[in-house]
Amino acid sequence: MGVATASETDAVARLRAATAFVFDMDGVLYRGSLPLPGVAELLDALALRGRGVMLATNNSTATAASYVAKLAKMGIVVAEDAILTSALATRDYLRQTLPAGSGVFVVGSPALREQLFTDSDFYPVQYGEEQPAAVVVGMDTGFDYAKLSAAMVAIRGGARFIATNTDATLPIETGFVPGAGSIVAAVATASGRDPLVIGKPETPMLEMALARLRASPAQAVMIGDRLETDILAGARAGMTTVLVLTGASTRDEIASAPARPDLVANDLPALTSALIGG
């Protein structure tokens, strides 16, 4: 099967009994703009068995609609409500915890703003115009000293400090660039406060994905390619975890990882085989 862990039998049994599957995307379903082999067959196998599927990404710079379009170009058909970005998860968290009609100061991309303020009654607070109820920090290629200062003042003034994710870097064609985590770290240093983190490896986004799927952690599987985010978050959430070796992490890194996966699959066809018993 290409799947092997010390507790393989029990983990495979939980995989087959699961009612909900949460996937990371890049490195799991596709790489760059190309679908990974076996993605359609795996999603079809889950659909035929009536399993719920949610795609959960730390990326706050793209909307669910843009992911639907991107996936469609690769021949992967997914409904918009089956995609949960860290920006949407942040909006849902704010809905649950802030008074209606609260002001929010955002350090982030236009897509983050769109997702926070669409279908919510929050409003954007600009530089120093009033004290916001929360400061939300995500990936922002226009981050500067003025934004850092405004975020610092608001957080020190009592605003909640929320980070979409703390990914230190982002992969690009030529290597890496600073990620949202680098910006979050600057705000944390200036404000003297630690953020509540929504994305992986923390659990709020996965908890929201499970709520959408109406599944408990014991009924759910987290499938990802990164030990330090996907697998750690799934383990913290109490889910069965599957590492696919088609992306960032390698089998050699498992022994020193903060959380070891329940199953390791060489690729998606191996995972489908484990799921259906082939």
Image (cartoon, helix red, strand yellow):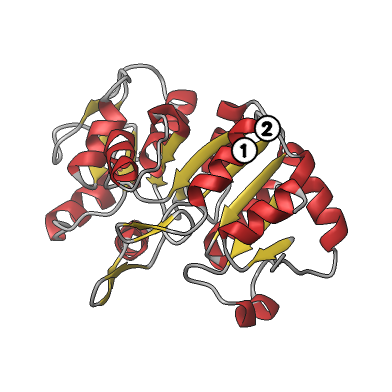
Amino acid type indicated by mark 1: Leu
Secondary structure under the numbered disc 2 in the rendered image: loop
Image position, residue 252 (x, y; %): 63, 83
View extreme (bottom): residue = 252
Residue behind mark 1: 46
Residue behind mark 2: 49
Q: Is residue 124 above or below residue 221?
A: above
Can residue 29 be seen at all in this image of the molecule?
yes
Image position, residue 33 (x, y; %): 29, 57
Q: Is residue 214 left or right of residue 148?
A: right
Residue 271 in which image quadrant: bottom right
Image position, residue 135 (x, y; %): 32, 42
Image position, residue 257 (x, y; %): 64, 74
Secondary structure under the numbered disc 1 in the rendered image: helix
Residue 72 in which image quadrant: top left
Q: Is residue 16 above or below residue 182?
A: above
Q: Residues within 10 Å of mark 1 (few under 14, many from 20)?
A: some
Can residue 235 be seen at all in this image of the molecule?
no
Q: Is residue 191 left or right of residue 45?
A: left
Q: Is residue 92 left or right of residue 251?
A: left
| Front one among 30 and 21 | 30
Amino acid type indicated by mark 2: Arg
Do the CB atoms of the residues marked 2 and 1 lie less than 8 Å apart? yes
Q: CA distance from mark 2 to mark 1?
A: 5 Å
Q: Residues within 10 Å of mark 2 (few under 14, many from 20)?
A: few
Image point 31% across, 58% down: which residue? 187
Residue 83: which numbered mark, if any?
none
Query: Which quadrant of the rendered structure holds the C terminus?
Result: bottom right
| Front one among 175 and 50 | 50
